[in-house]
Amino acid sequence: MKLEILYSQNSINTYKSCPIKFKYKYIDNINWKKFGHKEYYDSLVYGSEFHLVCERFFNDIPLGIDKNSLFYSWIEKIKSIVDTNEGILLPEYEIRFKLDGKNLVAKYDLVIIKEDKIEIWDWKTENKKMSYENYKNRIQTIVYLFLGMEVLPKIFDKNIDYQDISMNYYQMEFDDEPKKIVHSKENHFKYKEIIKNYINSIENNNFYKNTNHCKYCELENICKGI
Ligand code: SF4
């Protein structure tokens, strides 16, 4: 089977959590909503609304929110940790990269191109507190830092070393300071192999069920019938 897939942190993460789910979603194009988990879907909508407010803020567009709202207080928090006066600010910035002929994409909440460093920012609205270790090992960090290092210095003609690019997670509800993961040469090649291994596994049709996450899977009913 010839696959033309645009790989992202979301799709690779889906494969990591359940390989057959990747096939349903990204090859068979089955999209489904899980009814009865209103809280989960409300939190997704909530998160995407806040990301829109952030995009407006960094594009200097009126926020259109109440000054007494939670989102307003979160924007105030962001103002206190992100220096908007230095560098080029790129909200909702998407980059693409070909790795051994396979297409990869990353869409960042915010990229800041500074004189001698690049910062990637990600806003988290989940109400479960995340640790530095959680962030360090996630597929998002692997894909975002790898692609960022491969693509961003070339686009902006910067002589950036591995340790000059960082991934900064900020969990709105809990964090005073962002959780900053500084890239390294060692991790860059490690991340490259991890991404390649996932892609190879997918392209070799290595699809099987991992039932550890079925309880929260929107495809549970469909999956049972297949
Ligand atoms: S129901 Fe379970 S096995 Fe089926 S796709 Fe979802 S997570 Fe995978």
Image (cartoon, helix red, strand yellow):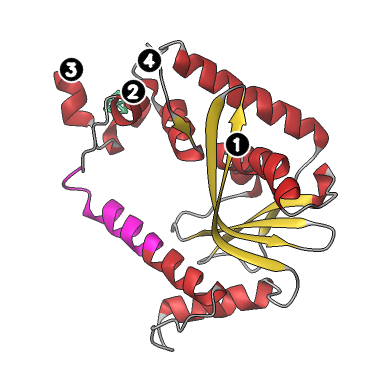
Main SS type for the magenta part?
helix
Earlier sequence position, callout 1 versus callout 2: 2
| Viewer-side label of 3, 2 | 2
- The image quarter containing residue 15 is top left
Q: CA distance from mark 3 to mark 2?
A: 12 Å
Q: Amino acid at mark 1?
A: Phe
Quarter occupied by the N terminus: top left
Question: From the viewer's perspective, is the residue at label 1 or at label 2 nearer?
Answer: 1
What segment is highlighted magenta in the picture? 34-48
Compute the Cα span from label 1 to label 4: 25 Å
Assign the C terminus to one quadrant of the image: top left
Q: Are marks 3 and 2 in contact (CB under 8 Å)?
A: no
Q: Specify which label sits upstream in the sequence, 3 or 4.
A: 4
Residue 114 appears left or right of 175: right
Type of the residue with mark 3: Ile
> Is residue 49 positioned above or below 212 on the image?
below
Mark 4 within 8 Å of ligand 1, using the beta carbon:
no
Helix or strand or loop: what does disc 3 sit on? loop
Q: Is residue 9 visible?
A: yes
Q: Earlier in the sequence, mark 3 or mark 1?
A: 1
The residue that label 1 is drawn on is 97
Residue that label 3 marks: 226
Q: Earlier in the sequence, mark 3 or mark 2?
A: 2
> Which percent across, then down, holds residue 34?
20, 42
**Residue type marked 2:** Lys
Disc 3 vs disc 1: Cβ atoms closer than 8 Å?
Answer: no
Please indicate, yes or no, whether residue 137 appears anywhere in the rendered image.
Answer: no
Callout 2 crowding tier (Cα within 10 Å): few <14, some 14–19, many ≥20 = many
